[in-house]
Image: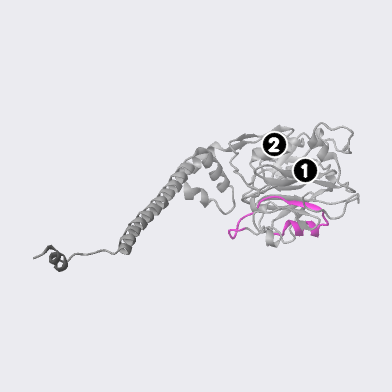
């Protein structure tokens, strides 16, 4: 048999050039697919490892746990990542040693708040320089890298009073409503309240409320610290009973805290004070009687994270607050100006802000000049 016949008769697979190309391409695609799969696995591994590193990072623990534990409805977030022992350890390292001195009311000398020819700092200039045609209040925008907010300067402390929900014990009202119902100009939320439905409608305030020199409300769960004003319009901070506080001249008060500054002396903050990073509401008074309402916006990623107690104290010291106390924060932190919700609350913005039990408001008892409605900056 000839060699040519052998070729013709044997079963030999002859591959077309296209088959060869397709085979090589298939092998290459398999390699590419394998490479992409490997990349996905590596990325997931990086995320998991990064997450574990973050969770075990002490700085993150000190941020996450106190921030979660000071919310009304989201304490579970602390226990989602950490066990009870870890939560307790972190909270024990983050606390406030409050200045519990008796407020020296004689240090507050009301008056002399007119504009000056010389100022010791830009903050003093900001504070004393009035808005056009407005002798009642001024709003200063607060902008830092991590948070934003507003500081309301009230030149006459007699213009400050407590507004209480007309449905107290049944339902709260928004700060906007409380301001409008009491012929106010500006208002911020006041004390805390019981969370009955996972959201809290402001119906059941914690602790005591004093209004017009009368002890009108008492409920369990308060801090034991009263924040308010005397009949002489001086801010008074005390842990005495409402009856004693009234006897000492207090006419309007809510029960909350902690004290941040007393007689010009700052409370000592360990870590972040155990209050985390969050929206804040604070009320303060200077030695010349000027009252300060501070609102810090928070829990708004990309806009404003929120502030710690140390952040708040730093702002207050810039404007020389002499006595200052923390009010209810978080989603309750709301500010109303001339009938409008002014800040961006962390929740409830679409319907005018969360309903609360009470609010500190600015009126215009002396009919001083007040300008037309403001525009936000």
| Residue 260 appears anywhere in the view | no
**Is 64 inside the magenta-drawn segment?**
no
Q: In the image, which residues are magenta?
A: 171-199
The answer to whether residue 196 is magenta is yes
Which of the two residues, 226 or 145, is positioned nearer the viewer here? Answer: 145
Residue 359 at x, y percent in the picture: 74, 52
Q: Which mark is residue 167?
A: none
Q: Are marks 2 and 1 in contact (CB under 8 Å)?
A: no
Task: Name the residue beneath numbered marker 2.
Answer: 314
Q: Residue 364 location in percent, x, y?
A: 87, 51
Q: Main secondary structure of the magenta part?
A: loop
Check the image and report above or below for 333 versus 102. Answer: below
**Residue 15 in the figure: left or right of residue 153:** left
Image quarter in which the N terminus is found: bottom left
**Which residue is tagged 1?**
292
- Whole-number angstrom distance, CA of label 2 to CA of label 1: 14 Å
Q: Secondary structure at mark 2?
A: helix
**Image depth: mark 2 or mark 1 in front:** 2
């Amino acid at each position: 048999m000839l060699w040519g016949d052998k070729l013709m008769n044997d079963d030999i697979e002859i591959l077309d050039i296209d088959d060869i190309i397709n085979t090589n391409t298939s092998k290459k695609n398999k390699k590419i697919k394998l490479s992409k799969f490997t990349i996905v696995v590596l990325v997931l591994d990086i995320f998991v490892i990064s997450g574990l590193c973050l969770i075990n990072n002490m700085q993150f623990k000190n941020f996450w746990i106190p921030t979660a534990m000071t919310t009304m409805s989201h304490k579970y977030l602390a226990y989602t990542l950490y066990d009870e022992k870890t939560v307790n350890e972190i909270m024990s390292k983050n606390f406030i040693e409050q200045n519990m001195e008796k407020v020296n009311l004689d240090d507050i000398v009301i008056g002399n708040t007119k504009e000056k020819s010389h100022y010791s700092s830009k903050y003093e200039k900001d504070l004393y320089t009035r808005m056009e045609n407005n002798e009642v209040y001024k709003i200063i925008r607060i902008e830092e890298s991590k948070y934003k907010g507003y500081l309301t300067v009230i030149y006459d402390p007699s213009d400050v009073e407590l507004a209480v929900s007309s449905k107290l014990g049944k339902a709260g009202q928004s700060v906007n409503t409380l301001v409008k119902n009491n012929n106010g100009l500006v208002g911020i939320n006041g004390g805390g309240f019981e969370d009955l439905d996972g959201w809290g409608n402001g119906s059941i305030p914690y602790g005591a409320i004093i209004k017009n020199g009368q002890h009108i409300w008492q409920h369990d769960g308060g801090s034991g610290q009263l924040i308010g004003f005397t009949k002489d319009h001086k801010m008074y901070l005390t842990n005495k009973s409402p009856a004693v506080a009234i006897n000492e001249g207090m006419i309007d008060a809510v029960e909350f805290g902690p004290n941040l500054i007393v007689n010009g002396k700052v409370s000592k903050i360990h870590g972040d004070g155990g209050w985390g990073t969050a929206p804040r509401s604070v009320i303060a008074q200077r030695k010349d009687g000027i009252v300060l309402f501070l609102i810090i916006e928070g829990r708004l990623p990309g806009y404003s994270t929120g502030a710690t107690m140390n952040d708040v104290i730093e702002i207050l010291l810039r404007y020389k607050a002499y006595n200052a106390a923390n009010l209810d924060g978080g989603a309750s932190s709301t500010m109303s100006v001339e009938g409008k919700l002014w800040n961006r609350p962390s929740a409830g913005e679409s319907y005018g802000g969360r309903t609360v039990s009470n609010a500190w408001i600015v009126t215009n008892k002396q009919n001083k000049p007040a300008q037309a409605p403001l525009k936000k900056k």
